[in-house]
Amino acid sequence: MLEKNATVMNPEDVECSGERDKSDASPETQPPPPPHEVEAKAEEMESKALAVAFLLSPVDRYGFLVTDKRYNGGHATSNTYKHAVWLENRRTQKWVKMIGKQLEDWEVCQLRNAATLKKRIRKGIPEALRGRVWSHLAGSSQMLLNNPGAYHELLQTTQVPCEETIARDIGRTFPKHSLFRDRSSLGQCALMNVLKAYSLHDPEVGYCQGMGFLSAMFLCYMPEQQAFWLLVACLNHKRYGLADLYRPRMPKVPEVTFVFEGLFKQLMPQLSAHLENEGLHPTMYLTQWFLTLFTYNFPFEFVTRVWDAFLHEGWKVIYRVALALMKISQKTLLSSKFEIIMEYFRDLPNKVDTDEVLTVAFRMPIKRAQIAHLLEEYHSSSAAS
């Protein structure tokens, strides 16, 4: 029986003898914690730090912490920001007039305004319309109409072979975005659903980490069901063929690297030779760019502008952008050695100017015939080996 004024101890405050013994033990005698416990603890600490950061810091127009390197906006009261808002609204009005408020004139627009549409897409699709336009460009809006209920049926499946792997990677996907900041967030739940559903929809491809960044970007612009069908379209449509980036052995990676390398040698022979002499193969910087199509660590404005054009024109845009990044870096790279070059590529995403890169990209003298010839050469050599 408790005596008067006795203190009732909180069980959480009670230190068991085993814990006390461990804490008193010298560092030399303490066994190191298992790697998975260390990783889990680090993720927990990072999650708490980000939660505090979100309370103390504003986010940019895309939802990223302002302190994040992706941020390149301005203060809401600045003249630059006001002009950007005015320009965005003006462009949105032009788009609505061109395609109709509900995109009901989309097919007509593509036929009658092909040149204007291409020009405006290259300038950037307005934020308010981006999700719907992406769905129409990729054909995923029609896929959704043709398969009512299919997505929700996939989510009813209880046995998902890739579930553990997906769950482990979710927290590493845009952790500084307000939509995906913690495991209980709506964004992470939606992302989990989209990736699980795709792994069941296409068991041969299943799940690969790069798919998470694409899906997360889609979820910034549309509900999860639409994001799922856009992922399906991007992975399976012939124009994009991203499934071959993620299926076992990643057959598209050497293919697109071969095409890039061929174009690089034609357009920038001196820089190509210099990097080769320094021991840098294109895979050393290209693989990350191509596996996530720049979504991993480039500024979000840059990424969405690239994707606007990619969904309309296909892989030619990706080659253009990669070559433009090399073009604007040419002077620095030609005067640098291996270590400096590698450091430069690591920091490059934080230095890009979206308008500069895309202006250079769309001026690159690349023809579809060149790409087709390089693809034919690649497949011929692959068949012979």
Image (cartoon, helix red, strand yellow):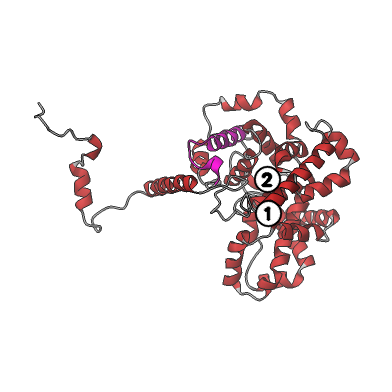
Q: Along the line of sight, which residue is nearer the eye, 377 or 166?
A: 166
Q: Is residue 274 shown above or below 283?
A: below
Q: Is residue 153 shown above or below 77?
A: above
Q: Position of residue 180 (x, y in %)?
A: 54, 41
Q: Say which residue label 1 marks.
A: 79
Residue at the far bottom: name it.
335
To which quarter of the image does residue 381 belong? bottom right
Residues under labels 1 and 2: Cα distance?
A: 46 Å
Q: Say which residue label 2 marks.
A: 244
On-image quarter of the C terminus: bottom right
At 76% across and 70% down in the image, what residue appears?
Answer: 269
Task: Indicate the amino acid at tag 1.
Answer: Asn
To which quarter of the image does residue 231 belong? top right
Whether residue 134 is in magenta: the answer is no
Q: Position of residue 156 (x, y in %)?
A: 56, 24
Q: Count residues near mark 1 (Cα–Cα under 10 Å), then give few for <14, some for 14-19, many for 20+.
A: few
Q: Which residues are magenta?
A: 177-200
- Secondary structure beneath label 1: helix
